[in-house]
């Protein structure tokens, strides 16, 4: 009867290099955890010690680099609009007064106003020219109201998107304001005269930059809020002068080109003439000097008989 022998396999121990790799991995993991703990402790210490951070910003001027970016919640687009309109009226002087009253009633202002009265002696027709600033949201209604004064001859409206410029200036102002606030705090807590003087110099420079940016922002806001409108008031429409066509048109163009060329030639000759006279005089002087310096020819003796 056959005998079955059952063999039991005992697990072999892991090689030495596997055990060494496990030890190294464990040590690396412990070192990483310790480093993360040290960084957290250092960050807490820096947050607690605000005076030293502010001193560093006062000396090397890096306060603005710590500003947190914000997302603008304003309108999608900030438009700068300019417009011009020509209106034919019976009395430009009276119409200019009506335009001024209309602009002021809409919340705007007149920045320039020029009027010319009629002059029969010089055959001069009256006209008026105004430059006004009206609220941007009142531009359409203002243009419509101008149509009640006379006949609108032409209208031009131009808009430019200034959203990027508005956002950039606002971000720079915010960064400088944070820097100024921190420097003001440091000036009040400075521990030495040297640190105080450095902080005050930096603070003065930052305040000057901040005021310049705030003035630039105010001008930009004014351009966005108020539209510049130019109004020309005349008694007759402006009729563009038609250029002649055909043979006579070519003849006119050729004559104009000839007269323009002659004008250029005459101008060039008039400019060069004084220099030519001076150069001629210099040449005559040099020639006279050379002639005087030339030795006299030798005279040979006459033969004797």
Image (cartoon, grey):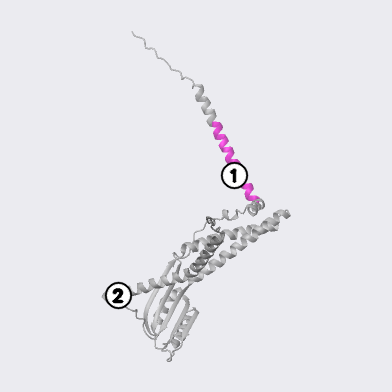
Q: Residue at x 59, y 63 (%)?
A: 210
According to the image, label 2 marks what residue?
251
Which of discs 2 and 1 lies nearer the camera? The answer is 2
The answer to whether residue 46 is magenta is yes
Q: Residue at x 49, y 81 (%)?
A: 113
Front residue of 158/16: it is 158
Q: Position of residue 91 (x, y in %)?
A: 42, 88
Up-down relation of residue 161 to residue 114 (above or below): above
Q: Which mark is residue 40?
A: 1
Q: Position of residue 284 (x, y in %)?
A: 52, 65
Q: Give the side of residue 44 with respect to residue 106, left or right.
A: right
The total number of labels drawn is: 2
Q: Position of residue 46 (x, y in %)?
A: 63, 48
> Gap in Å between the C-alphas at discs 2 and 1?
89 Å
Front residue of 241/294: it is 294
Instruction: Say whether disc 2 or disc 1 marks the residue closer to the N-terminus.
Output: 1
Q: Residue furthest top?
A: 1
The magenta span reads: 26-49
- Mark 1 residue element: helix
Front residue of 224/43: it is 224
Q: Residue furthest front?
A: 305
- Mark 2 residue element: helix
Looking at the rendered image, the quarter that the N terminus falls into is: top left
Q: Which mark is residue 22?
A: none
Q: Quadrant of residue 190?
A: bottom right
The answer to whether residue 246 is magenta is no
Report the magenta stretch's main SS: helix
Q: Mark 2 and 1 residues: CB-CB less than 8 Å, in contact?
A: no
Asked if residue 276 shows in the view, the reply is: yes
Q: Position of residue 86 (x, y in %)?
A: 39, 80
């Amino acid at each position: 009867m056959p005998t079955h022998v059952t063999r039991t396999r005992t697990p072999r121990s892991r090689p030495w290099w596997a055990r060494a790799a496990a030890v190294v991995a464990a040590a690396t993991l412990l070192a990483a955890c310790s480093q993360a703990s040290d960084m957290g402790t250092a960050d807490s210490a820096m947050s607690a010690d605000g005076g030293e951070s502010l001193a560093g910003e006062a000396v090397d001027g890096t306060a603005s680099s710590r500003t947190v970016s914000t997302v603008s919640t304003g309108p999608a687009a900030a438009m700068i609009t300019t417009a011009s309109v020509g209106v034919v009226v019976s009395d430009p002087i009276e119409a200019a007064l009506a335009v001024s009253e209309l602009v002021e009633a809409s919340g705007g202002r007149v920045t320039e106003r020029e009027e010319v009265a009629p002059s029969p002696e010089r055959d001069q027709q009256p006209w008026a020219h105004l430059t006004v600033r009206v609220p941007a949201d009142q531009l359409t209604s203002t243009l419509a109201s101008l149509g009640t004064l006379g006949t609108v001859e032409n209208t031009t409206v131009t808009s430019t998107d200034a959203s990027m410029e508005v956002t950039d200036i606002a971000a720079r102002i915010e960064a400088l304001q944070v820097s100024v606030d921190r420097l003001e705090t440091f000036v009040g807590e400075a521990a030495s005269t040297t640190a105080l003087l450095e902080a005050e110099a930096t603070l003065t420079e930052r305040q000057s930059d901040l005021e310049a940016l705030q003035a630039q922002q105010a001008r930009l806001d004014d351009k966005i809020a108020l539209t510049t409108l130019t109004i020309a008031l005349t008694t007759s429409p402006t009729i563009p002068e038609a250029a002649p066509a055909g043979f006579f048109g070519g003849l006119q163009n050729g004559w104009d080109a000839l007269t323009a060329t002659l004008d250029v030639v005459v101008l060039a000759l008039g400019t060069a003439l004084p220099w030519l006279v001076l150069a001629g005089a210099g040449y005559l002087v040099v020639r006279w000097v050379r002639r005087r310096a030339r030795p006299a020819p030798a005279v040979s003796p006459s033969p004797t008989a």
